[in-house]
Amino acid sequence: KIGVFVDVQNIYYTTRDAFGRSFNYRALWQILSLKGDIVVANAYATDRNDESQRKFQSALRHIGFSIRLKPYIQRADGSAKGDWDVGITVDVLQNSPSLDRIFLLSGDGDFDLLVEAVQTKHGVPVEVYGVPALTADSLKRVVSCFHPITESLLI
């Protein structure tokens, strides 16, 4: 049983910044479905109430992902908030006892403690997909396997 947890903002910005392209979620699904039964597949995104974003979310749903949305908040100083780190962490921790393998898509080093906890407490291997140059070393060090996002996973 496989769980897939996608930090959509992180994957969007890292693939755009590194390659000038988009991530191919359908190709990922095809790869992961060969590794086992995908029983949980959550994609975490911010809701900007934008038509192109709605189309993207619809495409993810069609592939098989459940979409988790958090409102996009523009602060008075111009900065933005729409971070899913805690939500992803809670979902991974809640689901890990019933999973055999977890795939996390993010390069965010904040997840290193989560990965260590899941692997230590539940004995569930956590594999990460991320853009190599934009994935935190602390995260790469603790995962059971790091899968670099390369051309084959881009559109």
Image (cartoon, helix red, strand yellow):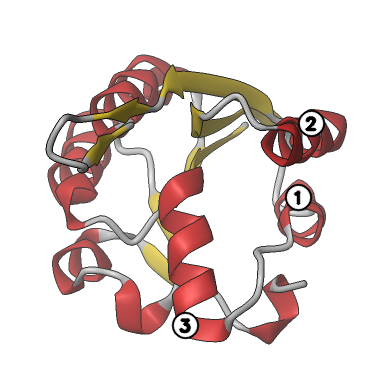
Please give the name of the residue rendered at 38% of the width and 48% of the height, measured from the top-left corner: 125
Q: Position of residue 108 (x, y in %)?
A: 26, 55
Label 1 sits on residue: 29
Please give the name of the residue rendered at 50% of the width and 33% of the height, measured from the top-left corner: 45
Q: Tell me the element at label 1.
A: helix
Q: Amino acid at mark 1?
A: Trp
Label 2 sits on residue: 64
- CB-based contact (under 8 Å), mark 3 and mark 1: no
- CB-based contact (under 8 Å), mark 2 and mark 1: yes
Q: Amino acid at mark 2?
A: Gly
Please give the name of the residue rendered at 51% of the width and 21% of the height, measured from the top-left corner: 69
Please give the name of the residue rendered at 36% of the width and 29% of the height, measured from the top-left corner: 88
Label 3 sits on residue: 18
Q: Which numbered disc flags the more N-terminal residue, 2 or 3?
A: 3
- Crowding near pointer 1: few (<14 within 10 Å), some, many (20+)? some
Q: Quadrant of residue 34?
A: bottom right
Q: CA distance from mark 2 to mark 1?
A: 8 Å
Q: Position of residue 97 (x, y in %)?
A: 39, 20
Q: Amino acid at mark 3?
A: Ala
Q: Nearer the viewer, residue 104 or 37?
A: 104
Q: Which numbered disc flags the more N-terminal residue, 2 or 1?
A: 1
